[in-house]
Amino acid sequence: MTKRILSCMQPTSHLHLGNYLGALKNWVHLQDEGAECFYGVVDLHAITQPYEAGDLLDATREIAAAYIAGGVDPEKSALFVQSAIPGHSQLMWLLATMTQMGKLERMTQFKDKAGKHKERAGLGLFSYPVLMAADILLYKTTHVPVGEDQKQHLELAREIAGTFNHRYDVEHFVVPEPYITGAGTRVMSLRDGSQKMSKSADSDMSRINLTDDADMIAKKIRKAKTDPEPLPGDLKGLEARPEALNLVTIYAALAETSGEKVLEEFGGKSFSEFKPALSDLAVAKLEPITRRMNELMSDKAEIDNILVKGAERAQAVAEPVVEDTMKIMGFWRG
Ligand code: AMP
Ligand code: TRP
């Protein structure tokens, strides 16, 4: 059976190296292996936290441009905007009726984003994982390529699929498998090896954005936090050195090799030697992506064309699934 892939990112701000290494790179691999791929820009998720209405459209196009620049081929993969496919919100409601609040309360991303005042968080933020489950189940997705931080959300999507199938005694929804592989499934901040690299961290120096130019990438790597020791010969030697481990991991992910291999080459060397090598590698890999992204962003009509075609393909799969789901649940369908 061919794999059916779906994954998405929020148009909240620029994509960073973690998004690229943890997710996008795997999306491209799966596409090139011949899987049937759906890649969404999840704008309905993006409004679960304060945002500027005037920025949403450009952010949506920018994420689409980043997908294409990173290697998603719109001829092969359906590239679509979530809000253009009504089935996402429709299915979300249906699934919300079979999701326990207790499970949503345990979601670590909700706890992080809601902060100290949980009672002030919006219902949208609370129910975010149900919308994500709807995104996935709507396409009868078999595999979901994401970074490590999405594992808990995916587990919930699997449970919701199981609950539906059990409650209505059907084999309707496919229980999706996480696809979390490669060295870069959890890229950490360049300023603090205990925090993941994220769009929302205050310091821009903590992340490498796909919009950064070569000088900026070099500067961020030069200033990345490290320790005074040279690199060890094996990964065990990095156990209590999270910042050093992160830089080695980033190198490995960019070079498509393993941390062990990187240390075979750089073991015994100091950061003053390793950082320039990492910087050259990062620039070599990211510069073409940034350049292509800028080109694409100068032709918004072309991006819109791609998104219209992608929406048609997504809709063709999504609509019958909503219909079938509603029939199973006993709704009047005219
Ligand atoms: P987000 O930035 O939350 O929209 O995430 C989009 C995708 O990038 C998801 O698949 C995440 O799991 C992945 N991702 C986000 N941050 C990281 C990170 N620091 N390391 C690896 N993957 C990440
Ligand atoms: N929650 C994901 C994130 O923050 C984005 C997302 C929404 C997603 N819907 C999805 C990822 C469906 C995979 C599949 O990164």
Image (cartoon, grey):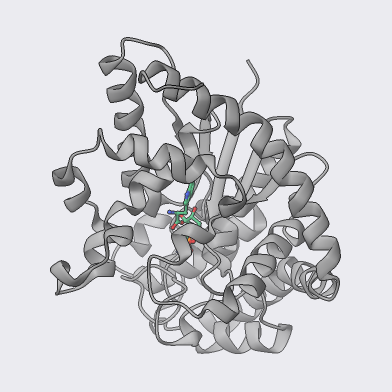
Q: Residue furthest front?
A: 334
Q: Is residue 210 above or below residue 170?
A: below
Determine whether, in the image, residue 220 is placed left or right of residue 256.
left
Residue at point 84% right, 66% down?
301
- Comparing 126 with 94, the one in front is 94
Question: In which quadrant will I find the N terminus?
Answer: top right
- Residue 153: x and y in percent read 34, 45
- Residue 282: x and y in percent read 67, 71
Total marks placed: 0
- Residue 261: x and y in percent read 57, 53
- Comparing 209 with 259, the one in front is 209
Residue at point 50% right, 29% down?
322
- Residue 286 appears in the picture as rendered: yes
- Residue 66: x and y in percent read 69, 64
Q: Is residue 229 above or below residue 74?
A: below
- Comparing 216 with 37, the one in front is 37
Determine whether, in the image, residue 143 is placed left or right of residue 186.
right
